[in-house]
Image (spheres, rainbow, N blue to C red):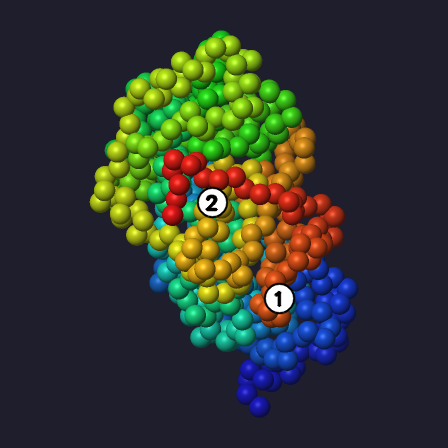
């Protein structure tokens, strides 16, 4: 008997029996396999962390592997969220360089208990590092297969930019069996940075005429621009109705939302505070991240030449702006229409596209999850990606897109889920994995009931919203 077989055989039978009982009882929340649907190849033999290095570096890139006591044969390969190359506003905390295996530790522990092997890595660079993320995922899979064991199935999953990396791996690698991109900018680099430019352009035109929009010379230059923007926005809150109306118009553009992680939209006051949260978040990408992106692609890839800002303001937003500043909106919109627009550098725009945009050419079951109110990666990214998948494959049978939304009121305590970038609960993460797993193993798409039960989990709290439908990308910026 081989060493691997002896190690598998030496694992205590009671543990397997106990695990099977837990599987039967908490299938929906743990991601385990129900009786009668077990994989005949499980449990899988593997080399454990006593025999291999479960953390370390691969070609200078940090990685982490966590292994269950009894492996069900499935590897979950995780790609982490966007990480700025330099301290990112508004907190300006030092960038992370660790190698997480899941979006939160609670989810990681639950998935280990269910028998999954987990792996994740940092990337060779922080910043707008899509290529580095894809390369890190490829290297980690090869390392796992060579050192731990060959998975029966491999699912890729990730959040934020890691969700983009996830989809690119799923489209490119034949070892991927299922994909779970979460809160990702699946419409691609240029569409999302065009929208960030819209917000910056409006703020410059209406509140900060000397503000730089592109061509930042350094991180310090971009940071100083963001800091001055925050100062002027904060002052605008108490500078009279005209200035406040201008600030509200800035917040309304870019097809943005009026709920943040901290503030709901139950009152005009909370909507304005949510708008401030969102402005500060988006402007971090319009300054600090834009500097990083422009260094990578050799110039400004973004444009607002075709933007028609008047079409972006909803009837409710017009009503509120007219309440705050009667008669002021037409003049503010006229200022935007008359201001000189920004054209992209064609070579830089082409280079930005080449960094890696999901094509929608689905190869495996793909479950996307998005909060309904996300300012960083607006939920309309899912609309674009769904349309792209339909156009490129002629079908969407391998794609299921689900959404979470927050409670109606939460200002003062923060949204527990559903509002804010990647604001998911442990149960929502684990429930999504469990449904993807069953979909891959059985070939049957999850039902909304399956998803609702699994994502509610043991806490009985979830934002899963089976009737939520994302809006369209701004029509004059229609994305193919």
Vertical arrangement, residue 212 with respect to residue 82, above or below: above
Quarter holding residue 338: top left
Quarter holding residue 143: bottom left
Total numbered circles = 2
* Residue 409: % across, % down: 68, 30
At x 54% / y 24%, what residue is drawn? 315
Vertical arrangement, residue 183 with respect to residue 59, above or below: above
Vertical arrangement, residue 408 with respect to residue 161, above or below: above
Question: Can residue 137 be seen from the camera position used here?
Answer: no
Could you tell me which secondary element the residue under label 1 belongs to?
Answer: loop
* Residue 115: % across, % down: 63, 68
- Left or right of 218 in this view: 477: right
* Residue 447: % across, % down: 66, 58
Assess disc 2: are there few (<14), some (14-19) or many (≥20) residues with their C-alpha within 10 Å of its C-alpha.
Answer: many
At x 57% / y 90%, what residue is drawn? 1
Identify the residue under disc 2: 381
Assess disc 1: are there few (<14), some (14-19) or many (≥20) residues with their C-alpha within 10 Å of its C-alpha.
Answer: few
Question: Looking at the image, which residue sits at the far bottom?
Answer: 1
* Residue 284: % across, % down: 41, 33
Task: Give me the disc on residue 444.
Answer: 1
């Amino acid at each position: 008997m081989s060493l691997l077989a002896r190690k598998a055989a030496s694992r205590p039978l009671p543990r397997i029996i106990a695990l099977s009982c837990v599987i039967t009882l908490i299938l929906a929340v743990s991601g385990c396999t129900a009786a009668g649907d077990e994989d005949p190849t499980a449990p899988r033999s593997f080399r454990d962390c006593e025999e291999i290095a479960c953390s370390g570096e691969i070609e200078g890139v940090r990685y982490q592997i966590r292994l269950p006591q009894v492996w069900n044969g499935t590897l979950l390969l995780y790609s982490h969220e966007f990480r700025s190359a330099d301290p990112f506003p508004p907190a300006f905390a030092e960038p992370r360089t660790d190698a997480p295996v899941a979006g939160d530790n609670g989810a990681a522990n639950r998935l280990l208990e269910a028998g999954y092997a987990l792996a994740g890595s940092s990337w060779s660079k922080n910043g707008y590092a899509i290529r580095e993320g894809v390369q890190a995922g490829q290297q980690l899979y090869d390392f796992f297969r060579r050192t731990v064991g060959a998975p029966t199935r491999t699912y890729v999953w990730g959040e934020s930019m890691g969700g983009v990396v996830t989809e690119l791996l799923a489209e490119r690698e034949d070892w991927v069996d299922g994909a779970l991109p979460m809160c990702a900018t699946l419409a691609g680099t240029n569409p999302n940075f065009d929208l960030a430019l819209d917000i910056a352009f409006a703020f410059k035109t209406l509140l900060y005429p000397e503000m730089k929009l592109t061509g930042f010379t350094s991180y310090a230059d971009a940071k100083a621009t963001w800091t001055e923007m925050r100062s002027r926005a904060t002052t605008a809150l108490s500078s009279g109705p005209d200035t406040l109306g201008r600030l509200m118009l800035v917040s309304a553009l870019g097809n943005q939302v009026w709920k943040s992680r901290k503030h709901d939209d139950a009152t005009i006051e909370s909507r304005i505070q949510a708008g401030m949260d969102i402005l500060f978040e988006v402007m971090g990408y319009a300054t600090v991240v834009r500097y990083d992106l422009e260094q990578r692609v050799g110039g400004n890839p973004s444009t607002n030449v075709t933007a028609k800002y008047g079409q972006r303001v909803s009837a409710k937003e017009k009503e509120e702006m007219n309440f705050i500043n009667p008669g002021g909106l037409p003049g503010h919109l006229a200022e935007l229409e008359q201001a000189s627009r920004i054209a992209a550098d064609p070579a830089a725009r082409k280079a930005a596209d080449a960094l890696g945009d999901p094509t929608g050419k689905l190869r495996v079951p793909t479950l996307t999850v998005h909060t309904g109110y996300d300012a960083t990666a607006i939920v309309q990214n899912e609309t674009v990606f769904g349309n792209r998948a339909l156009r490129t494959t002629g079908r969407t049978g391998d794609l299921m897109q689900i959404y979470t939304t927050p409670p109606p009121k939460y200002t003062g305590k923060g949204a527990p889920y559903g509002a804010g970038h990647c604001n998911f609960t442990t149960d929502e993460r684990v429930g999504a994995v469990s449904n993807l797993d069953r979909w891959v193993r059985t070939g049957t798409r999850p039902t909304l009931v399956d998803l609702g039960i699994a994502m509610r989990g043991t806490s009985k709290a979830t934002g899963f919203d089976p009737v939520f439908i994302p809006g369209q990308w701004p029509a004059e910026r229609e994305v193919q």
